[in-house]
Image (tube, rainbow, N blue to C red):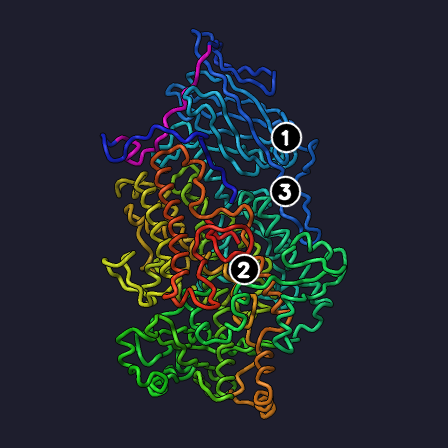
Amino acid sequence: MLKHNFNVSHSGSTIRNLVSGPKLPLFSGRGTNAPAFSLPTKDSKRSNGVIRRHCGGTGIKAILTTTTAAKSTTTIKAKVTLLQEVSEEPPSQLESPGIDNSVDSFPKTVLVELVAAELDPRLEKLTIKSCAHRSGYNDNEYYFETSFDVDEDFGEIGAVIIENEDENEVFVKNIVFKGFSVARHRLVEVTCNSWIHPKSNNPEKRIFFWNTSYLPSQTPTGLKRYRQKELQILRGDGHGQRIPADRIYDYDVYNDLGNPDISVDLARPVLGGPDRPYPRRCRTGRPTTNQDPSSESRNASFYVPRDEAFSKVKNDTFAAKAFKAVLQILIPSMGGGSIPNADLGFPYFTAIDTLFTQGIELPDDSETGSLPSIIPRLVKFISEKILLRFETPQFVNRDKFAWFRDAEFARQTLAGVNPCVIKLVTEWPLKSNLDPAVYGPAESAITTELIEQEIGGFTTVDEALKEKKFFVLDYHDVLLPFVNKVRELKGRTLYGSRTLFYLTPDDTLRPLAIELTRPPIDGKPQWKQVFKPTWDATGVWLWRLAKAHVLAHDSGYHQLVSHWLRTHCVTEPYVIATNRQLSAMHPIYRLLHPHLRYTMEINALARQSLISANGVIESSFSPGKYSVELSAAAYDQLWQFNLEALPADLINRGMAVEDPTAPHGLKLTIEDYPYASDGLLLWDAIKQWVTDYVAYYYQESCIVRSDNELQAWWKEIRTVGHGDKKDEPWWPELKTPDDLIGILTTIIWVASGHHAAVNFGQFDFGAYFPNRPTIARTKMPTEEPKEEERKQFLKNPVEFLLNCFPSQIQAVIVMATIDVLSTHSPDEEYIGEQIQPYWADNKVINAAFERFNDQLKEIEGIIDARNADTNLSNRSGAGVVPYELLKPFSEPGVTGTGIPNSVSI
């Protein structure tokens, strides 16, 4: 999100001490620290209260004069920087009709106005206008300069207004003012980072507030109407179709994933509402489809508010030059000739290896010929051929056969790409909560007798339960309602599954049993079977097939729930509400802004090509056309805001208990749980930073309760953005600073730490797909087998397993997609790495942020030390991929480390 921000270029500032001295209005929630910017003086005359504009030099000076006695004025110089940003590329040419980027096409002038912070008690002050003229350019930056003669009675400057008189939109980077009297403030920067629409398209001018943060009750009188008007503009009126230049944030249901006008098979149900509760997305206002009035039509681009668009660097490296190249050029080229049979599997395991060693030859045409320059990591020119060839993932480089081992299968539930699902077994026997009249007997087939055969001589089931030794990966109830529907789709199958693990003395998990269940179908009763690790040949291969099914379940749940739902989808309402209800000068807006940037843009791209009908997810993951419905079921049954806080999540899953004497106030049930132990370091660092920040603005509960923007923000998140759950009792109240700290820490954790943990390991753990197959295409050979299937399995179990795995084109589609999704952009903004410009001059906030930054650097060292500790078997050992997904910082590219501020990929 390219919203504006603000900065004074030097770091010093006069800040009232928070802990000593009388409580001033600032510290009662009535504004912030910044004193007025004093103006140096020179003589000027006023006449008749009229603004006279004189042309000269690089711009037009605005002089406020009167016929009364001589008054002091100061000359303030302004330099406006525009960037050669480009709009999003259309799908085929990957080029844009956006603004004309030639020098001659750039505007010659930009109109700039200064806005007084305070109103004259006798008369509302006029703004001071000046026309900035283009003065030069360097690389992709164009400079415009002007100056203002400002009367001393004008007072503090509170905001700057920009008007674009050109016929094209322009991207304003910043405005630098020079000439203030206080030495530390001689250069003042207002950082805009925003698109400015042409005056001819929209007469509304753009306002950028100064660096000072204000709670609503302490907004300077001269800025109150601008604060209110800006929020009204951002909210819109809820009507009409949005156009690309709009900056309007509003809500709608997910009714644009299907395309019933093309085919009835592409129709998809509406997500959001009493039938299928779901978070809300950004409203676009497109017309409904002809075939289904409840569905919204689709077009080439999906609207997001203009300042939510990716920056040029990120757009080049991800959205246009990579993601669309993969989806709209690379994948069709494979289907057209490179892999002509969509159902063709891999004939042997070494054929999978060729994806990394030899590659796939692509057709030599104009479109694929452009791919090596767009996605050079994936597509290369070799021996005059265009080859799709994948980089070898770290997982394979370290131990190519690790995926075969049960220990690695278990380890990845704690230190893989989906470590937030496993939970402690607290009740025995395992039992379903589904209606047995519909889905069959509720009690699991994993019996006490069966498990004691596995753990006999060590302990009993009763003792293991008391000692917290049993853990389960449970996809039974969430998948079983979809099994029969999925089985009607070509080339895929599904089960409900449970996988039981035992905690060994060295804190590693040992898989004990996998239960696969099919509900009653076509007059047949429920089918379920338990598979165990064993030594006989047939049992070994049945166990491997059962693991493949569980891994496909885990991959689908990871992508649709742990990743899409719990980060991307639930965050969009936070973005919308923050922009609709919190002014850009609100301190909480400024805290959240870095953590909400780009999320709406990546979500729009997901609706276009990832989670849409026949998109990547539907075509390559087990649930098929029911994929996003499955995420809606998970939202309805499982999602709670209060449980998205990491400590609450761990306690809820039985993976930790509260312990005031333990680090972080929690004792982990499995001490060597890398996701939890590293995550809690990050959680505490975020919480401390948020605590310091909130304490600066909200010293008392009454300030929280009386902040009308803050209360409207939280109410809108609960009752509109997540309105299908508005009546749930678990929503936190917002009455005290502690309430606010908890809410903000949770939102920031979800957007940063949780997302990083489930996203940036996708290529390393999933590119060699036998480790994480995304789909199971064949049933278990023991489920009512035909004689021919039974013979095929017994004769060639390797071929049977390969046929269960994704087809060649399914595998390549997913591999190419997760390669792009695992990539850090060169302009990635990592958590706590750089202070936001509007805090740089505030000593208190600056010091708090520096402590946050120091904590994150310390966390990096702690994680490195943990990964080097050979006693921690879940993160170190021969061939083991170290757990680095929660290391805060990273280089660009696919690194398996780094925590961006926001859900931006």
- In which image quadrant can residue 246 be found? top right
- Most foreground residue, 236 or 478: 478
Q: Where is residue 195 drawn, in percent x and y?
A: 57, 38
1 or 2: tag closer to the N-terminus? 1
Tell me if 196 is positioned left or right of 64 in this view: right
The Cα atoms of the two marked residues, 1 and 2, are separated by: 45 Å
- In which image quadrant can residue 625 be found? bottom right
Magenta segment main secondary structure = loop
Is the residue 208 above or below the residue 731 in the image? above
Q: Which residues are magenta?
A: 24-42
Q: Where is residue 173 drawn, in percent x and y?
A: 55, 35
2 or 3: tag closer to the N-terminus? 3
Mark number displayed over residue 86:
3
Q: Is residue 381 magenta?
A: no
Looking at the rendered image, the disc whose residue lies closer to the viewer, 3 or 1, is: 1
Give me the residue at 65% from left, 49% from top: 89
Is the residue 29 above or below the residue 436 in the image? above
Residue type pointed to by label 1: Tyr
Mark number displayed over residue 255:
2
Q: Residues within 10 Å of mark 3 (few under 14, many from 20)?
A: many
